[in-house]
């Protein structure tokens, strides 16, 4: 089973990187239009993500990006160790091994972008995602040239390449649902449903898909994957069902 897990992880990493490299080299940025795949449902839409899922970041500086990349690296090492422990246990369900391998491969695929892409490609000043952001969501500008300042670049500071997007929108009869956290919790919007708005507008990549499928399998099959097998214990002397010898009267 170990060889199969290596093949699964390697195949996902290779396919993920091929897609990202092709998109990065041959597609225009998000503001130059998209490539429709299935009209009204799915399209290719090139963007680079500085943070985590759905664009969430820890900040715009180098330390925030280093922290995120090192956190990813630590998580990958932990998942790799967990896969090793699962392989050593002969009772591990194959489905659990595959699910964890999918998460490992996806996380590694996105870390590769952060680790090496800045070392391969120059930071393009024309791309808005390469501009240094302020805490308020704006941009820093060079006081002399008036041009946006570029983000920090280098090892572990690269952006993750995303390209897939669903374009299905809520129907016209859908009621408006707008839910946000209270201000004392940050006020972040957690649900925004309204007619004509995309149902799932996030832009993602093949590595994200691998992670999502792996996590989904673990959630759906949780009871099966983590069902405790009754341990076979040696019967103690007190549990020995054999009758004690009866002494015959003299």
Image (cartoon, grey):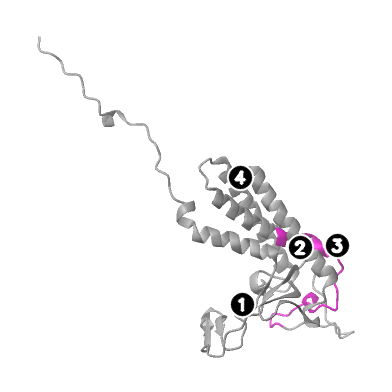
Q: Residue 108 location in percent, x, y?
A: 70, 57
In three-dimensional space, the C-alpha distance between marks 3 and 4, rounded to whole angstroms, equals 32 Å
The residue pinned by badge 3 equals 120
Rendered view: 48 above or below 31: above
Q: In this view, does 112 lie to the left or right of 78?
A: right
In three-dimensional space, the C-alpha distance between marks 4 and 1, rounded to whole angstroms, equals 35 Å
- The magenta stretch is 109-137
**Residue ID at (55%, 48%):** 94
Q: Residue 192 location in percent, x, y?
A: 56, 84
Element on which disc 1 rests: loop
In three-dimensional space, the C-alpha distance between marks 2 and 1, rounded to whole angstroms, equals 24 Å
Between discs 3 and 4, the one toward the N terminus: 4
Between discs 3 and 2, the one toward the N terminus: 2
**Which label sits on residue 113?**
2
Q: List the single residue furthest toward the right.
A: 145
Between discs 2 and 1, the one toward the N terminus: 2
């Amino acid at each position: 089973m170990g060889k199969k897990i290596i093949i699964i992880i390697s195949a996902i990493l290779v396919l993920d990187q091929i897609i990202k490299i092709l998109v990065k080299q041959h597609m225009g940025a998000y503001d130059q239009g998209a490539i429709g795949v299935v009209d009204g449902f799915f399209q290719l839409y090139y963007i680079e993500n500085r943070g985590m899922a759905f664009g969430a970041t820890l900040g715009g500086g180098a330390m925030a990006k280093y922290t995120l990349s090192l956190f990813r690296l630590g998580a990958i090492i932990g998942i790799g160790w967990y896969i090793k422990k699962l392989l050593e246990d002969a009772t591990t369900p194959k489905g659990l091994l595959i699910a964890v391998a999918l998460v490992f491969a996806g996380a590694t695929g996105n870390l590769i972008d952060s680790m090496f892409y800045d070392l391969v490609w120059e930071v393009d000043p024309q791309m808005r995602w390469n501009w240094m952001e302020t805490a308020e969501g704006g941009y820093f500008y060079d006081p002399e040239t008036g041009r946006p300042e570029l983000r920090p670049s280098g090892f572990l500071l690269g952006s993750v390449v995303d390209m897939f997007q669903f374009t299905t929108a809520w129907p016209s009869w859908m009621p408006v649902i707008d839910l946000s956290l209270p201000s004392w919790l940050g006020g972040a919007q957690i649900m925004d449903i309204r007619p004509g708005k995309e149902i799932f507008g996030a832009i993602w990549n093949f590595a994200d898909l691998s992670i999502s499928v792996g996590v989904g399998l673990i959630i759906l099959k949780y009871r099966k994957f983590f069902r405790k097998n009754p341990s076979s214990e040696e019967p103690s002397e007190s549990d020995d069902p054999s009758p004690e010898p009866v002494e015959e009267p003299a």
